[in-house]
Amino acid sequence: MQRIVVLNPKGGSGKTTLAINLAAYFAARGDNTLLIDRDPQGSSTRWLRKRKVPQPAINGIATFERDSRTTMSWQMRVPEGTQKIMVDSPAAVEARGMPELTRDAHKVIVPVLPSDIDIHAASRCIADLLLVAKIKPRGKPHRRDRQPGAQEHADVPVADALPREARHPHRRDRCATRRTTCEPPNRASASTK
C-alpha cells in the first residue's frame, strides 16, 4: 500500500486538483484507490460524490465530517485491499501539524505555482517538512527524474512523462502542424520506425 500526501500550507496551490487527478489516474490504472479529504472545504469529497458508475471506483474518507457515534480511528480505517492512498491536505497547515499529516507517507508532493509568493511559501513548507516533520529526502530528485525510466520507478506520473501538448499548451498549434501527435523528438523517432 502506497500513501501519497499532497501538501502545501498555501491555499490555491492546486493540492485538491492534483490529489483528485492522481486518485483518478490510479483508479483508471486498476489500483484500488482511497482518497482522504482532510480539507474542511470538502472539494475532494464533493468531487467523489459526483462521480458516475462507469468510472473506476475510488473510496473516500472525509476527516472533517465528524460523527459522534464513531471514533476517529474507526472513521479513518483503510478498506481492505487498498493499494493507493491519496491524501488531500488542508491549507494553512502549521509546521507542528505536519508530522501527523505525513506519518506513514511514501511520497509527499508539494505543488508550486510559478510565482514569487508561491515559491516562497513552498520553500518554507519544504523546510518545515525537513526540520519539523523529519521527512528524509531520498537522493537528488532533480537528477534522478531526468534518468531514463525514472517515471516508472516513481510510480507517480511526472511532468516529463506527459505529452508535450500537456506540458506546453501554448505550443499546441505549432506541434500539431509538425506531426499528428506532439511527442518529444526521441519518442517520435522511435514510433515512426
Image (cartoon, rainbow, N blue to C red):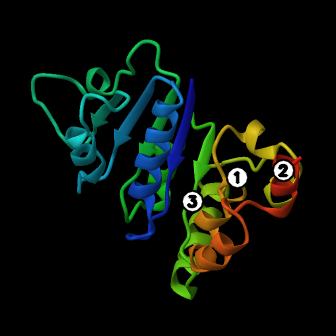
The answer to which image quadrant residue 67 occupies is top left
**Distance between the alpha carbons at the discs numbered 2 and 1:** 19 Å
The answer to which image quadrant residue 165 occupies is bottom right
Q: Which mark identifies residue 161?
A: 1
Q: Is residue 62 visible?
A: yes
Q: Residue furthest top?
A: 80
Q: Which mark identifies residue 110?
A: 3
In the figure, 167 relative to 74: above or below? below
- Residue nearest the observer in this picture, 21 or 86: 21
In the figure, 100 relative to 17: above or below? above
Residue 113 percent coordinates (x, y): 53, 75
- Image point (53%, 23%), residue name: 83
Instruction: Report which residue position mark 2 lands on.
Output: 192
Q: Residue furthest bottom?
A: 116
- Residue nearest the observer in this picture, 111 or 20: 20
- Image point (44%, 52%), residue name: 97
Q: Earlier in the sequence, mark 2 or mark 1?
A: 1
